[in-house]
Image: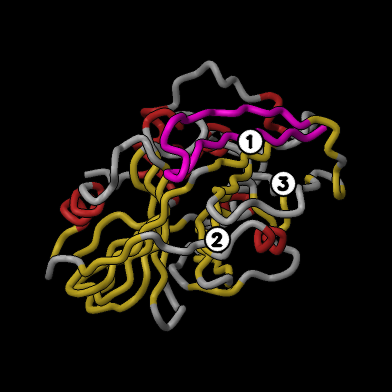
Amino acid sequence: MSRLIHISTMTRKDPFMKKVNLCLLSAVMLLMGSCIQKPKSSPPSALFQISTIDALLAGCYDGVMPIRDLHRYGNFGIGTYEKADGEMIMLNDTIYQIKADGTARTSQLPDSTPFATVIRFHPDTAFTGDPRIALDSLRQLITRQFPNLNLVVAVKISGRFERMKTRSVPPQEKPYRPLNEVVATQQKIRDSSDISGTVVGFYLPAFVKGINVPGYHLHFISDDRKTGGHLFECILVEGTIEWQICHQLDLMLPNEKSAFGLVDFTKDRSGDLQKVIKLKK
């Protein structure tokens, strides 16, 4: 039996109160095998997520939703593929896979995902970034635009980059190892220079710990759609930053017969996450 957790907040049009509703919708039939049947769609400002980051860190790499079904919930987002086979990026309603060698391809029908986060991207705000700004300063610049830091925000950065450092990982075989071990031994890092493209990702607040990545989680794809990956470092020469506040989180959990049900979620995986998200110096 699959489960959908729905969390929402009142929008800015409702100034007198905020609410958090947690609904557990049970009795959702399986679409096929380990794939889960989903609600028809999500509202425009809803962030739709498959599984949790801690499950991925623990080695839950089996696909639980066909990649093609993500189009029901968004046109913009990031994630990974079955067997942790590379990085996923959705941009303008097209989904790409960044393979371990850094090459990009459009998703094929059999593809599935163990973890993904998508939204229908309609930016609230757009502004021009400072010239020749590094990623750390760029993140600080973007964050200063937010009304507060307890928001879920979709972020898009389009422009020309002096340099770009990305990574991807090859497909894994069972028994799956934890993701931090995979990254430590098998990630492939790619350096690019004078490249134009788009950064896609999200800023999430501290309260999503264990569910998603607190802070920024960003992927990149080049304008020619030939390369990309998980973003480690970059220098933006010129470009436009757009962002959208998300007022609802729809979290779809894998069924109870999957490996998800065997994960020890009492373990704090914050240290493992930092080893996966950040470049080891």
Pick the residue in front: 53 or 14.
Answer: 14
Query: Horizontal placement of 145 versus 176: left or right?
Result: left
Magenta region: which residues?
A: 1-25
Whole-percent x and y of residue 256?
Answer: 77, 29
Residue occupied by mark 1: 6
Of mark 1 and mark 2, the one earlier in the sequence is 1
Amino acid type, label 1: His
Rendered image quadrant of residue 150: top left
Of mark 2 and mark 3, the one earlier in the sequence is 3
Decide: few, some or many residues near mark 2? Use Cα within 10 Å; few <14, some 14-19, many ≥20.
many
Query: Horizontal placement of 29 versus 146: left or right?
Result: right
Quadrant including the N terminus: top right
Residue located at (60% from left, 28% from top): 21
What's the distance in space between the residues labelled 2 and 3, CA to CA? 21 Å
Q: Can residue 188 be spotted in the picture?
A: no
Mark 2 against mark 3, which lies toward the viewer?
Answer: 2
Residue occupied by mark 3: 64
Q: Extreme bottom residue here? A: 224
What's the distance in space between the residues labelled 1 and 3, CA to CA? 18 Å
Amino acid type, label 2: Arg
Amino acid type, label 3: Val
Query: Horizontal placement of 59 versus 242: left or right?
Result: right
Circles 1, 3 touching at the beta carbon (< 8 Å): no
Compared to residue 260, the image places residue 37 above or below, namely below
Residue located at (16% from left, 59% from top): 134
Q: Which numbered disc covers residue 120?
A: 2
Residue located at (57% from left, 50% from top): 116
